[in-house]
Amino acid sequence: MIETSRLLLRRWRDEDFIPFAALNADPIVRRWWSAGPLNQADSHAQAERLRRHIEDHGFGFWAVEVSQVSPFIGFVGLQNEEADMPFAPAIEAGWRLARAYWGQGYAIEAARAAFDDGFGRLGMSEIVAYAVEGNMPSRRVMERLGMHHDQRDDFNHPHRKSDDPFRRHVLYRLRSPG
């Protein structure tokens, strides 16, 4: 569990699965994924994988709640990146919030807390994040977090077909300050 002045990053609860499914069904939230919105079964399966990562590793994409506002607004955190990614092995930062909670600084606040935990308690030396090349909102979050982009690191996502308009991705990095 990680706490900030406004947020609690915590383990997933069964009651998070329904609002997570609503978030994943929103076509605006999911506009940068080739698969588009997720159905409830796929969303629940994803939430279960996120929960299992935290149980197995002691960190992950935490469920985020806002004190006095909402018991669940989405997820933010760090996880082990898949082995077939061109920059693996790596620790990936990620976030996905319900649209009602965009523009309030929650993603930045939660990600900074997750980064502090990763570099501090977990002793990580580098954290990466990636997004579809045209996903400027996520790229701005990465930049506001102090992450650095080098276009030599950009890549074609190995799980996307060659004609997929969301195939090209940018990679951002942040090294441990210590």
Image: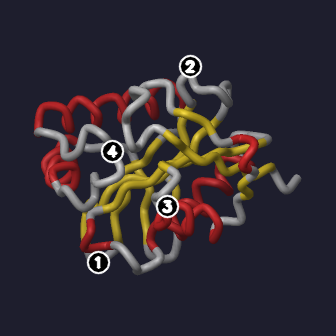
Q: Which of the 4 image quarters holds residue 90?
A: top right
The three-letter code of the residue at mark 1 reads: Gln
Residue with the mark numbered 3: 138
The reply, left or right, for residue 148 in relation to residue 58 is right
Residue with the mark numbered 1: 68
Residue with the mark numbered 4: 33
User: Which label sits in the foreground, 2 or 1?
Assistant: 2
Q: Residues within 10 Å of mark 2 (few under 14, many from 20)?
A: few
Sequence-wise first label, 3 or 2:
2
Sequence-wise first label, 3 or 1:
1
Q: Is residue 54 above or below residue 4?
A: above
The reply, left or right, for residue 39 in relation to residue 164 is left
The three-letter code of the residue at mark 2 reads: Asp
Using the numbered discs, state the Cα–Cα distance from disc 1 to disc 4 in whole angstroms. Answer: 31 Å
The reply, left or right, for residue 45 in relation to residue 167 is left
Q: Is residue 165 above or below residue 98?
A: above
Residue pictured at 30% horizontal, 40% vertical: 34
